[in-house]
Image (spheres, rainbow, N blue to C red):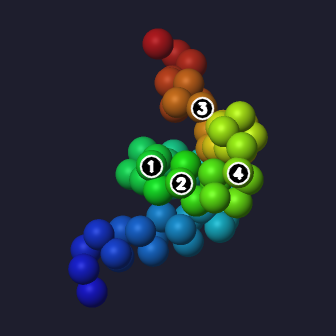
Amino acid sequence: MDQSIDLNIELIERCKHGDIKAQFSLYIRYPSAMYNIAIRFLNNKMDTEDVLQESFPSPAAFIPKSL
């Protein structure tokens, strides 16, 4: 199997178990695709942006608190 497919499967499995780093990795890899899917379902730009913001962790969640 293609390495990128293997990585995606691994990331999805980690997401299923609540791994926010995996969620963030998927978001970074596929922001346009996720937006396009959400806009098709919701048919509203503001709702789509809200759903994406609520569905994925903030990049600030990955900044160590002990900097």
Toward the viewer: 62 or 56? Answer: 56
Indicate the secondary structure of the residue bearing disc 4: loop
Residue 36's x, y, as percent?
53, 54
Frontmost of labels 3 and 2 is 2
Does the CB distance between marks 2 and 1 fall below 8 Å?
yes
Front one among 54 and 34: 34
Q: Which mark is residue 58?
A: 3
The Cα–Cα distance between marks 1 and 4, rounded to whole angstroms, is 15 Å
Mark 1 in CB contact with mark 3 (< 8 angstroms): no
The local secondary structure at tag 2 comes to: helix
Q: Amino acid at mark 3?
A: Ser
Image coordinates for residue 27, horizontal then vertical, percent: 49, 48
Image position of 44 with respect to 59: above or below: below
Between disc 1 and disc 4, the foreground one is: 4
Determine which of the numbered discs, if any, sits on residue 43 in the image. 4
* x 56%, y 71%: residue: 13
Residue type, numbered disc 1:
Ser
What residue sits right under mark 1 in the picture?
32
CB under 8 Å between callouts 4 and 2? Answer: no
**Label placed on residue 10:** none
Determine whether 49 is above or below 11 in the image: above
In primary-sequence order, the first of circles 3 and 2 is 2
Q: Position of residue 12 (x, y in %)?
A: 53, 68
